[in-house]
Amino acid sequence: MADAAVRTAPVPAEAAEFPGVSIALGAPLARWSLRARDPKALAKAIGHKVPGTIGETLGGMACLGPDEWLLRLPEGASIPLGEGLPLSVVDISERAVTLVLDGDRAIDALSAGCPRDLSKFPVGYATRTIFETVEIVLIRESETRWSVDVWRSFAPYLWTALTTAASHLR
Amino acid sequence: MILIHCPYCDDIRPELEFAYAGEAHIARPADPSALSDAEWEKYLFIRANPRGRHNERWRHVHGCGRFFNAVRDTVTDKFELTYKAGEPRK
């Protein structure tokens, strides 16, 4: 019996192309959920500054809550576990997949299901929010490029919702 | 859509990101085993249910995840203000 874990993609491997926006499955990432009451303990553990205000991102790290950070690094990366420090480091790499929306109309496809006013969403900002009924972590990587982290089991639904919204763009 | 100010994010977010979590400022009894059945009933089930200004708990569940308190008018559904958990009743 094979003991190697096999990763299967929950959405089509080929990007879906629409006028003004493409929707594609992002490359697998290493993800950590980092919790600490004191950001200084976290900075000490991982060896660099952590973003201090909710929504801010710094070096692949997004501040999601007053004591919660999401760190996304290329697959295979590792971070110190901060033994002895008052914090929690949880590997959640396989919990989520990333959908990448790229193009001028990406904002319109996302606005079809996300209640946030995305026109006021700054580049480099990241937040947990909701798309239709699915919780997502939305990251604006550039003016036209957005990353959507979604729990793996919700990904087929989100894919259908986003591609349907994109197909209706005029 | 109602927009709610989250005191932790210090930002105004759409109502869909939030979940209602009951009346605020209901302290758990310090010594539960000393309570009579009537006192337990009061703690567990009896709520103010006012018509008008209501202190209540909300959770920014699809955001920062934090519980906070809000003052909302139950007639108009208008949020008067929100404040962090642990702060005194406003």
Image (spheres, coloured by chain):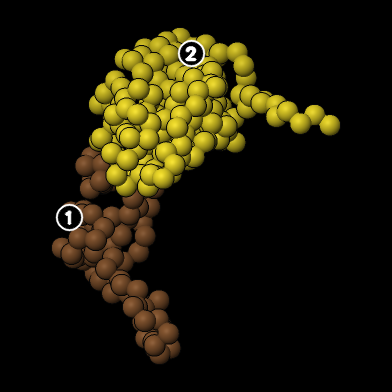
Chain colours: A yellow, B brown
**Cα–Cα span, label 1 and label 2:** 42 Å
Name the residue at 57% across, 32% down: A94
Query: Residue visible at 45% across and 18% down?
Result: A101
State the residue lying farthest toward the right: A1
Mark 1 Cα-neighbour bin, 10 Å: few <14, some 14–19, many ≥20:
some
Verify CB contact (< 8 Å) between mark 1 and mark 2: no
Is residue B84 in view?
yes
Residue A74 lies left or right of residue B36; in this view the side is right
Q: Amino acid at mark 2?
A: Ser
On screen, residue B19 above or below A104: below
In the displayed structure, A146 sits above or below B16; it is above
Figure quadrant of residue B27: bottom left
Q: Is residue A19 above or below residue A108?
A: above
Q: Residue A3: horizontal and vertical position, in percent?
A: 76, 31
Q: Which residue is mark 2?
A: A22
Q: Position of residue A35 (x, y in %)?
A: 39, 43
A154 up-or-down from B36: above or below: above
The disc labelled 1 sits on which kind of residue? Glu
Q: Secondary structure at mark 1?
A: strand
